[in-house]
Image (cartoon, grey):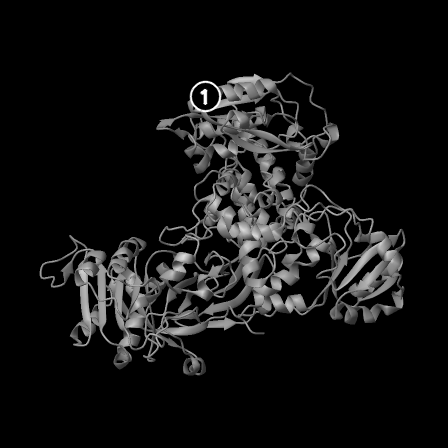
Amino acid sequence: MDDLRKYAAELLEKGEVAAVIGYQQVSEKRTKPIIAKTAEDCAKLVFNEYCLNNLAVYLTKARVKELRRVNGAVLKLAITAKPCDVHGIVALIQESQLKREDVTIISFNCAGVVKDFGMDFNGETLATKCVPCDTHKPLYSDMVFGEEKETPKVSDEVLAKIESIEKMSAAERFEYFKAEFDKCIKCYACRAACPLCYCQRCITDKTIPRWVESSAHSRGNFSWNVVRAFHLSGRCIGCGECERACPMDIPLSLLNRKMVIEAKEAYSYISGRSLETPTLVGSFDVKDSDELFM
Amino acid sequence: MEEKIISKEDLLNLCKDVIGNGHTLITPGKTEYTVVKDTSEIVLDTTAKPTKASYKTFVFPKAEPVIYYKRGKNDVQLLDVEVEQKKTVILGAKPCDTNSFNILRHLFNWDYKDEFYNVREKQFIVIGLMCNFSDNFCFCTSVGSSPVSDKGADIFLVPLDENNYTLRVVTEKGGEFIKDYSKYLNAGDEAKTKAVTDTVKHPEIAFDSKQVHEWLGTNFENPKWDGVGDLCLSCAQCAFVCPVCHCFDIVDEDYNYTEGRRMKNWDGCQFGHFTLHASGHNPRDIQGKRYRQRVNHKFKYYVDKFGEILCTGCGRCSRGCAVSIDIKEIVSNCKD
Amino acid sequence: MDNIYKPYLAEIAEIIDETPDTRTFKLKLKDPEVAKNFSFKAGQFAEYSVFGEGESTFCIASSPTRTDFLECSFKVYGKVTQALNRLNQGDTIGFRGPYGNHFPLEELKGKNVVFIAGGIGLAPVRCVIDNVLDWRDDYKDVTIIYGARSVGDIVYKQEIAEWKARPDVKTVVTVDPGGETDGWDGEVGFVPTIVEKLAPKAENTFAVICGPPVMIKFTMPVLEKLGFKEENIFTTLENRMKCGLGKCGRCNIGNVYVCKDGPVFNYTQMKERPQEF
């Protein structure tokens, strides 16, 4: 931890970065984001299995971007990112929301995080997003901390659920998702927590014409959740922040994971893995399968 | 106030009767308060974490039509919406939830009376349950309530032992309701109840709401608001799970080319477009201003207008916040 | 069940094109019983709706002393105003109101009045002007100063002509420099400059001012210099509103709901508010 704090403080001191977006401990088994602007702030930085947030979400926030302007110069931002969060940063770079040279990535060797704050870290409490994770070392980084550790092996319940839903009839599937979406209250916490939901004005806030009904009734909830799933197809990096942020416990990762699987099978593409690859939606090859076209 | 004792078994029998009488029965589930179909679903646990969502949706639905319209060539026909008249019993509400109607009632009734709210609230019977849960986010004691408070409940339950509850009739409405079920009630024992409630651990008082009110009055401009704004992601989780947040939007939606309805939908003050004018001007254009509004609305404006704090101290907003913004911490920090 | 969200139905009796993007509707409430009992005071506002599109908030632009029609003027900006703009004479809209407080015209009898308006800001002022003119004998000198960006942007041309024709009203219309046309016989210059030039006397006078924020910002010091007291300067605010009933939580400035405690405020009250509007 001291290495991390020292490194972050040095970045600030040298005037290389304007701020370090990181985690701070709030209580024994809970952290929260911090935007460290001083060496004092850096002394609060931590990295452990309670660092649940995907901080990449902050990189596209106007107010955070403004922080880069210091005394007439435009500095970089540093961010502490789990290897999976790095996928989010890469996806943002792929989608031209960010330049690689504008961000200093401080990453960690990661063996997974807990499902929710307050839990002890063991196999049973491993976050669902960590279960299928194959990136325990960051694919891109400027600095890596932490030792490599064994990830607990647990069964992939989300995948099992997706498989069981695939076996349902269309009507059953509709009923299943209707019941889940009916819980939605349209607080848009899913959108707010998602690093890839960076649109300045979301389609659901557009009123001329209104594409997505703003009411939280069955029809409005279906439109919203399905539109979001489509919009994230081939883009979702599987960080699971939407599901964690959802106050109504809607299993959003079922949809998003399914779309990740589809994109991988049809186009051998996983979002946020390579800075050299164009985005799935932003590239076209005549040999592409047209099975998923709408 | 009258205290009785009811056995656990009879409490379930009472619930069975309530459902049998065609009333709606609601209890806390895992995520939200849910309608009970079978009494076997009922779990009365004083140590349970508060549900993620409050039960305000039952009196102030997340989306409800207020008028139906039908367009003709140049004409429009309006059809009224009637609110379903159905007695609704909520069983096992935490003290931090029971007080919500007392707070909301003012807003929906100053000058203009919102009958959509009133009709529903009138048919509600709130059966509160003493609370034995407390985490870092709880602060009911800082806003004038407590884990053993029966404020706002019509009837209040205190578990005496494995098999018995004290059933306290708090309001006339509660007394009227319980008449039909008096066969399940036995003589109460206030000393026994007190022995139990005295053992309940109260969350520490985090702030003095009067001092907060005073501070807010002179600190509309304060750099403290900026720090909050940096981290907030501008969703409405906090407002929508809150038992007393009540801001709403009014929108029209068509079902087809000629018919539709005007909806009253929950809205949240942390959304950037909440106060955005058509001209592009926005009085609360940055997140710091929006969070300042949230805190001021709860701990100053509402107090000035209605004499009540717009907060029950349940801590839901903080517990559920994706970036762990803690209202208790922020309000505790509202001092020099 | 009483329904505070249920609008009255109103028929568009006449449409007046004020400028290329501003229109005035003359409305008639459809229900004769409602129309008979309807009353309001100068400065109050209402929620106007196109069914299927939604509601929008504007002041009632006609004077309560003229009961033939209810009038509203709107500039095409958002979803609802675009929809209103598509409607024709004879079509039906929703009308919910009147809401809010009003200008204290009764209390101000016996004083001079200065009206200062810019752009579409003349709509809420026009209602007060006509009200004062209909009670002309109760007030002393009446001065109207109105500014628009260009000649083409001037609203209420017909009303302005009527005011100009009256010997008992001093009416001055100005356009921003560069906004004049050949043959323009009014003033050229920004509103604050014209106010300074005309220098209406402040003694025993109240002012009603409404227009773009920048106009108000620069006119206030001029009025102060002329000796106007803050409590004698009135304006009307238009915050984003949905319900108009003091419930939906949008329009508050500090602990004041513009829809119920406003929209009319004097400058002493404005200064007491947190500066968030």
- The residue tagged 1 is A276
Q: Position of residue C51 (x, y in %)?
A: 44, 65
Asked where in the image residue B297 lies, by quadrant, the reply is: bottom right
Residue C234 location (% of width, % of height)? 34, 65
Quarter that holds the N terminus of chain C: bottom right
Count of number-bearing discs = 1
Nearer-the-camera pick, A129 or C157: C157
Chain name for mark 1:
A
Q: Please say whether residue A274 is visible from this viewpoint.
A: no
Q: Is residue C263 toward the left or the right of residue B182 in the image?
A: left
Return the residue nearer the eye: A10 or C93: A10
Residue sitting at x 54%, y 66% = B66
Residue A65 position in % (x across, y down): 43, 33
- Residue type, numbered disc 1: Glu
Badge 1 marks a residue whose secondary structure is loop
The residue at the point 52 percent across, 50 percent down is: B216
Is residue B178 rendered to the left or right of residue B262? Answer: right
**Which is nearer the eye, C73 or C87?**
C73
- The picture quadrant where one finds residue A125 is top right
* Residue A142 percent across, percent down from the top left: 50, 18
Q: Is residue C37 visible?
A: yes
Please give left or right for residue A13 compared with residue B134 in the image.
left
Image side of residue B131 versus residue C51, left or right: right
Q: Quadrant of the image for the C terminus of chain C? A: bottom left
Classify mark 1: residues with Cα within 10 Å, few (<14), some (14-19) or many (20+).
few
